[in-house]
Amino acid sequence: GENVEQHPSTLSVQEGDSAVIKCTYSDSASNYFPWYKQELGKRPQLIIDIRSNVGEKKDQRIAVTLNKTAKHFSLHITETQPEDSAVYFCAARTLGPILTGGGNKLTFGTGTQLKVEL
Amino acid sequence: DTGVSQDPRHKITKRGQNVTFRCDPISEHNRLYWYRQTLGQGPEFLTYFQNEAQLEKSRLLSDRFSAERPKGSFSTLEIQRTEQGDSAMYLCASSLDRGTYEQYFGPGTRLTVT
């Protein structure tokens, strides 16, 4: 089955700096990679996602890059703010009907605790 | 609130007791997922429904766990003969079966087994 590794486990940056979180996956059939932000005591919320036919996607201060050959993808947050402090999870999934080999479960990384210091 | 809801939010039970959790997905979503999250870890997949059919189950889902979605709307997750190792946050998510397939998570039910 799919295995997702995430690094670093903790990341501390100064406000205004950039933060980068990296993930690797094992299943070459995975073709959808979402990133979730989870604040303490709250539900995971999707912040950005990317499909395997795209190499990069941006949404304001957040970007995700994907290298299918190397099976790794990264989250980039620029101009970090204190409200960016949270745990970030990467995940991988194979999209598509289950009868043609597509599953629907998300396999998550172990999370990165991001702390943005003033 | 039109998001995913879960009930109860917290449950404390003694070892050996049975517990049942409920999840109400976003109304138009036909896919429903259960995950378990322990402290410092990402959510782990337990099971998934397409309408009322349970299509996928994790090896993590022992025979003490059972999930249902009888009418294709809300779902229940029951844990029989709870053990201390069952203590975790149980998250429910829902999605459409088309488009982005984005999964929306509920607030979770925190289970503590004493």
Image (tube, rainbow, N blue to C red):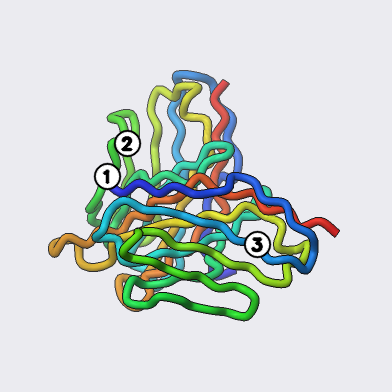
The picture places residue A98, in percent across and down from the top left corner, at 19, 61
Q: Position of residue A100 (x, y in %)?
A: 14, 64
> Does residue A112 appear in this view?
yes
Measured in 3D between alpha carbons, the distance from the residue under mark 1 to the one under mark 2, in whole angstroms, is: 7 Å
Q: Chain of mark 3?
A: A
Q: Which residue is mark 2?
A: B61
Q: Is residue B87 above or below residue B30?
A: above
Depth check: give the residue in front, A39 or A30.
A30
Within-10-Å neighbours for mark 3: few <14, some 14–19, many 20+: many
Give the chain letter at badge 2. B
Circle 1 residues within 10 Å: few <14, some 14–19, many ≥20: some
Q: Which residue is mark 3?
A: A19
Q: Secondary structure at mark 1?
A: strand
Identify which amino acid the numbered label 2 is placed on: Leu
Q: Residue furthest right?
A: A118
From what the image shows, is residue A18 above or below residue B67? Answer: below
The residue beneath circle 1 is B57
Q: Tell me if residue B104 comes above or below residue A24 in the rendering.
A: below
What is the CA distance from the residue labelled 3 to the residue labelled 2? 36 Å
Q: Secondary structure at mark 2?
A: loop
